[in-house]
Image: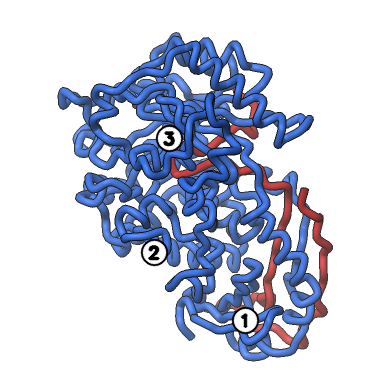
Chain colours: A blue, B red
């Protein structure tokens, strides 16, 4: 039994593929066509794959599950936008996906253009989201959005009734008044920190003048303690991999509600120079994940590792995913899109340094034109069913083979895998082992399933 | 809006194996939950707005 087994389906309908997840008692069986999975006693694996109660029950739900997955993969309309209010950033991180020239000497979007853009975006989202109570999400993103603080703060107040706002910032400009402004308006705040100590953070995240920013970010974290809507991203590189366990300890001590320990995106060459191997990433990541669980058991307080939690969600409840990288096609140009500081639309901020993915100007061409553009098409049609090795992978709809920008730039095409295939396989195996041991909820947000309904359940 | 799927139960098999400590284990585990999708996060940002801010 292979870890991730290839198969061919002779005819449409349910077909289960065995997957060795490294568990003492259970193996997994999956049907990638529907993202269905089950854990079966390994001594009974053969009967699970042929006629039996599992296959019979699954067969009755096959069409519904397939329809649900198809809707998630191909039926979404955008409900969020990543707004880049400036091209500039005060940092020069080694692995950034945005071109250095833009970040060092680029332009700000004017307040008028930002307001005009939000007017256009409000009209677009109303046209696709209707009169739901849910607001579209507008995330100020970078480069460093707080370098254009006046414009984005004015926008947050002007459009408070129209959008749920967030900001992803490097944290260096997050002074007391900015924190007061953002938290008093319930803006979701994301920070970035790559090390538990100065020297580790400094290895990849410095100002253009080479100055450390570690202490500023730690101070901002301290100010945000107790706020309900914030998170911190750590980008995992060769430079900080030995310190991930200490990152988790720092975040937990700082009462960070959610963090991400992300495998870096290798879209631009700078990132590839500090790219860890899959094997090193697996070892360090799961040491850190295990430490987060120990801390939860010791204190009763969770630090959610959102990138891993999202893999768990992809398995337990595909439609409850919060991150839309780990699905194919990804969320770029489907669940969300990005507005660059020059007014151009891209499928995702990851593409802003790649002009061939420019889908046109928001104010002159509009969102629909961009979504239907040739520039967006390769991204929104990237389908892991259609290329190898993903097309024969049993877990392809738990991981989605991220990221298309990375695949295109690093590996030569959208029909190639991303940078961390083996790491994703190990995350899926780990997640399935947690489910087998009834521990999955320890790694998920409390109440994560309150708005879900059970679609299929066998535990006997 | 996605259709809500129906719960299906499967009859219990004849016997079950045990964990090393002797506890019985379920021979089969399969869970799938469903909701209206609204995820817009990505590797550069995860929206955490499901809990009220202070």
Question: In this orientation, which residue lies closer to the viewer: A38 or A147?
Answer: A147
Q: Is residue A301 visible?
A: no
Total marks shown come to 3
Q: Position of residue A113 (x, y in %)?
A: 49, 16
Q: Nearer the viewer, mark 1 or mark 2?
A: 2
Look at 52% across and 62% down and name the residue there: A383
Residue nearest the observer in this picture, A60 or A376: A376
| Left or right relative to B30: residue A184 | left
**Alpha-carbon neighbours of circle 3 within 10 Å: few (<14), some, or many (≥20)?**
many
What element does badge 1 sit on? strand
Residue at the spot 59% in from the left edge and 43% down from the top edge: A335
Residue A321: percent from left, percent from top: 60, 49
Q: Quadrant of residue A122?
A: top right
Q: Are marks 1 and 3 on the same chain?
A: yes
Q: Which mark is residue B13?
A: none
Q: Which mark is residue A41?
A: 1
Does residue A276 appear in this view?
Answer: yes
Vertical comparison of A241 with A336: above or below: below
Residue placed under numbered mark 2 in the picture: A416
Nearer-the-camera pick, A62 or A380 = A380
Q: Earlier in the sequence, mark 1 or mark 2?
A: 1
Is residue B32 shown left or right of residue A279? right
Tag 1 near tag 3, CB within 8 Å: no
Image height of A7 relative to B36, above or below:
below
Residue at image coords 16%, 26%: A210
Residue at position x 38%, y 44% in the image: A356
Q: CA distance from mark 1 to mark 3?
A: 39 Å
* Residue at the disc numbered 3: A232
Q: Is the residue under label 2 in contact with that under label 3 (CB below 8 Å)?
A: no
């Amino acid at each position: 039994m292979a870890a991730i087994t290839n198969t061919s389906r002779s005819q449409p309908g349910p077909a289960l593929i065995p997957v060795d997840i490294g568990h003492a008692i259970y193996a997994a069986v999956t049907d990638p066509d529907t993202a269905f999975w089950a854990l079966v006693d390994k001594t009974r694996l053969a009967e699970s794959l042929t006629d039996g109660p599992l296959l019979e029950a699954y067969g009755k739900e096959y069409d519904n599950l397939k329809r649900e997955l198809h809707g998630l993969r191909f039926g979404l309309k955008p409900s969020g936008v990543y707004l880049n209010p400036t091209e500039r950033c005060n940092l020069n991180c080694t692995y950034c996906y945005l071109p250095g020239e833009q970040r060092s000497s680029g332009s700000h979007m004017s307040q008028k253009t930002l307001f005009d853009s939000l007017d256009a975006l409000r009209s677009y989202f109303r046209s696709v989201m209707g009169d739901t109570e849910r607001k579209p999400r507008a995330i100020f993103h970078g480069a460093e959005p707080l370098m254009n603080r006046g414009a984005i703060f004015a926008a947050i107040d002007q459009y408070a009734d129209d959008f749920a706002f967030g900001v992803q910032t490097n944290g260096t400009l997050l002074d007391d008044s900015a924190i007061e402004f953002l938290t008093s308006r319930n803006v979701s705040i994301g920070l970035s920190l790559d090390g538990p100590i100065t020297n580790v953070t400094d290895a990849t995240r410095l100002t253009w003048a080479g100055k450390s920013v570690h202490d500023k970010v730690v101070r901002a974290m301290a100010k945000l303690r107790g706020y309900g809507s914030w998170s911190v991203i750590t980008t995992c590189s060769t430079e900080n991999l030995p310190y991930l366990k200490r990152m988790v300890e720092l975040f937990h001590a700082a009462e960070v509600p959610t963090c991400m320990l992300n495998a870096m995106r290798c879209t631009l060459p700078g990132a590839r120079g500090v790219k860890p191997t899959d094997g090193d990433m697996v070892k360090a990541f799961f040491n850190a994940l295990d430490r987060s669980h120990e801390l939860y058991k010791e204190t009763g307080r969770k630090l959610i590792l959102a990138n891993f939690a999202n893999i768990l969600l992809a398995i337990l409840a595909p439609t409850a995913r919060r991150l839309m990288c780990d699905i194919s096609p990804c969320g770029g140009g489907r669940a969300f899109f990005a507005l660059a500081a020059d007014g151009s639309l891209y499928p995702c901020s990851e593409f802003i340094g790649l002009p061939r993915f420019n889908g046109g100007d928001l104010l002159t061409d509009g969102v629909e034109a961009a979504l239907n553009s040739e520039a967006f098409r390769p991204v929104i049609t990237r389908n892991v069913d259609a290329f190898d090795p993903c097309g024969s992978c049993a877990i392809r709809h738990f991981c989605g083979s991220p990221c298309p920008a990375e695949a295109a730039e690093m590996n030569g095409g959208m029909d190639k895998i991303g940078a961390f295939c083996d790491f994703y396989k190990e995350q899926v195996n780990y997640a399935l082992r947690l489910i087998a041991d009834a521990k999955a909820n320890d790694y998920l947000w409390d109440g994560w399933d309150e708005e879900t309904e059970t679609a299929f359940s066998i535990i006997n | 809006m996605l259709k809500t799927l129906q719960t299906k139960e499967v009859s219990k098999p004849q016997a079950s194996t045990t964990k090393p400590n002797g506890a019985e284990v379920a021979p089969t585990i399969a869970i799938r939950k469903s909701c209206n999708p609204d995820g817009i996060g990505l590797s550069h940002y995860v929206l955490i707005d499901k809990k009220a801010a202070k």
